[in-house]
Image (tube, grey):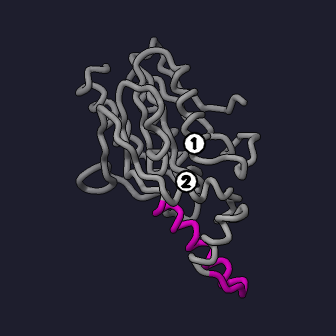
């Protein structure tokens, strides 16, 4: 099934394309507006930018419970294979867990996160919600439940395969790769993925675009 994707192109011919891999689950919603601003900034500099929906996310018609990390990796690789010309893959947070199988000229990652850390965040949110509802649960009890049946975590119904995959997933090597942190020594901005509601950071978007462009030049892509 073909998924929706947002594409922003420059006025003339594109020198290269940037495929953004958003953070996973609710973190994607909290960062989308800033990523779109970064895409527009890239287009202004002659680069096409693409932001695909993963199966089970955003406008996808696929139920999330039917998806695991392997399916996301395959879907992303298929999307990347259809991009003509030089391609840079730019991943944020958990997006870096699924980007290494996609064909690209270079990879750029911002604040990559392990699957285990993402899973712990989702489980802790469920424990807190259960406590407010007067339900006793724990990380251990939820992990045991999620190993046998789909588990609702922060509004996401996740299959046992997805939960197991997240628990074991680590960011894989890619080359050439630039991995940057968020903060004074990396990309200036705020951790939008920690906010309760979606927001935007125009300065961060400009910094993301500028760093991707500089990395692309250093790799001889543009």
Q: Viewer-proximal residue, 157 or 214?
A: 157
Residue 203 appears in the rendering: no
Residue that appears at 57% across and 42% down: 70
Instruction: Indicate the position of residue 16 as horizontal and vertical percent values.
Output: 41, 20
Q: Viewer-proximal residue, 27 or 201?
A: 27
Quadrant location, the N terminus: top right
Q: What residue is shown with label 1?
A: 70
Q: Quadrant of residue 109?
A: top left
Magenta residues? Answer: 116-137
Q: What residue is shown with label 2?
A: 165
Image position of 41 (left or right of 25): left
Cα–Cα span, label 2 and label 1:
8 Å
Q: Say whether residue 125 is magenta.
A: yes
Circle 2 packing at 10 Å, graded few (<14), some (14-19), many (20+), is some
Circle 1 packing at 10 Å, graded few (<14), some (14-19), many (20+), is few
Q: Secondary structure at mark 1?
A: helix
Q: Quadrant of residue 89?
A: top left
Q: Main secondary structure of the magenta part?
A: helix
Q: Is residue 214 above or below residue 95?
A: above
Q: Is residue 190 above or below residue 87?
A: below
Q: Secondary structure at mark 2?
A: helix
Quadrant location, the C terminus: top left
As drawn, the residue found furthest toward the top would be 13
Q: Is residue 168 above or below residue 210?
A: below
Residue that appears at 30% across and 36% down: 177
């Amino acid at each position: 099934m073909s998924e929706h994707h947002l594409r922003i192109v420059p006025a003339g011919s594109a020198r290269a394309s940037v495929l953004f891999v958003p953070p996973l689950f609710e973190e994607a919603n909290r960062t989308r507006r800033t990523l779109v601003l970064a895409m527009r900034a890239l287009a202004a500099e002659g680069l096409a930018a693409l932001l695909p929906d993963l199966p089970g996310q955003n406008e996808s018609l696929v139920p999330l419970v039917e998806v695991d990390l392997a399916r996301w990796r395959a879907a992303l690789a298929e999307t990347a294979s259809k991009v003509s010309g030089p391609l840079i893959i730019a991943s944020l947070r958990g997006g870096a867990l699924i980007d290494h199988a996609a064909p690209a000229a270079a990879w750029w990652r911002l604040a990559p996160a392990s699957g285990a850390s993402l899973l712990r965040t989702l489980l802790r949110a469920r424990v807190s919600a259960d406590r407010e509802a007067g339900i006793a649960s724990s990380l251990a009890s939820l992990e045991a439940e999620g190993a046998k049946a789909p588990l609702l975590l922060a509004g996401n119904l996740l299959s046992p395969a997805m939960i197991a995959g997240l628990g074991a997933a680590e960011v894989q090597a890619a080359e050439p790769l630039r991995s940057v942190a968020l903060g004074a020594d990396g990309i200036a901005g705020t951790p939008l993925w920690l906010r309760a509601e979606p927001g935007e950071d125009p300065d961060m978007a400009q910094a993301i675009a500028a760093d991707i462009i500089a990395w692309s030049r250093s790799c001889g892509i543009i």
